[in-house]
Amino acid sequence: MLSNYFTVGNNSASLCSSYICRMELRSKLIQDAVDQMSSLPGIGKKTALRLVLNLLRREEKDVRKFTSAFLQLKEQIKECTICHNLSDSTTCSICSSPGRNGSLVCIVEDIQDVLAIEGTHQFTGLYHVLGGIISPIDGIGPSDLHIDSLLGRLGKGEIKEVILALSTSMEGETTAFYLYRKMAAFDIQVSSIARGISHGDEIQYADELTLGRSITNRVPYENSLSR
Ligand SMILES: [Zn+2]
């Protein structure tokens, strides 16, 4: 029986797609594995089957290594007690790094934003991960986010500037304005990441909102020369 699945080999996509379409996988074990795999975002049934068959072809020790990595992740990952970034220890590597600028904090919605900004290698300050944005329609209010801990950090007086790096959606703007008002009680500079024309974009194809913001938030030409 197993050999049937192995012989599918590299041509699995064409053969298996018909199984998937008709939901006629002959093995409940494979079906269960496919169901689990396809429960991940962005993984359809066809891709899930390809991944499951790939795992099935590997040696048992490799599959154990694969699954134990996720179990260990789930059991041992921690949330940084300062910025709420995910971390292997109670204080993340960014917060504990002596090379980071502790007077500058970038506020983001989730850890993927941290990864994106870190990927630019342009930011040397610290972060504060809100864990979401205010969204009444989803039942998410300010008390559901890491706002109290942010205000607690600001209260220590070491932070001089905060950069709001939230999405441009209505919820993102609402959250930014809420934070702006809360942070007015502190002697800090509050800035927002620039919104504008993407690198390589042509002006005529930019939407009106983006183009309007680009003009409103224009910067001295010398600043663009230093990039
Ligand atoms: Zn941290």
Image (spheres, helix red, strand yellow):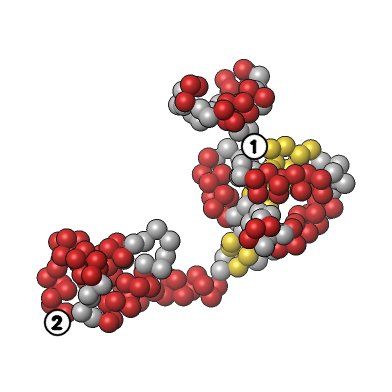
47 to the left or right of 146? left
Q: Nearer the viewer, residue 5 or 138?
A: 138
Secondary structure, mark 1, is loop
- From the image, which quarter does the C terminus lie in? top right
Residue 9 placed where, x, y %? 15, 66
At a point 28% along the width and 81% down the height, the residue shown is 29
Residue 222's mark? none
Question: In the rendered image, which residue does mark 2 sit on?
Answer: 1
Up-down relation of residue 73 to residue 176 (above or below): below
- From the image, which quarter does the N terminus lie in? bottom left
Question: In the rendered image, which residue does mark 1 sit on?
Answer: 193
At a point 53% along the width and 75% down the height, the residue shown is 75
Marks 1 and 2: in contact by CB < 8 Å? no
Residue 158 placed where, x, y %? 80, 47
80 to the left or right of 71? right
Identify the image quadrant of residue 93: bottom right
Identify the image quadrant of residue 218: top right
Q: Residues within 10 Å of mark 2 (few under 14, many from 20)?
A: few
203 to the left or right of 173? left
**CB of residue at label 2: within 8 Å of ligand 1?**
no
Secondary structure, mark 2, is loop
The numbered mark, 2 or 1, whose residue comes first in the sequence reads 2
Residue 211 placed where, x, y %? 57, 26
At a point 62% along the width and 17% down the height, the residue shown is 221
Up-down relation of residue 66 to residue 208 (above or below): below
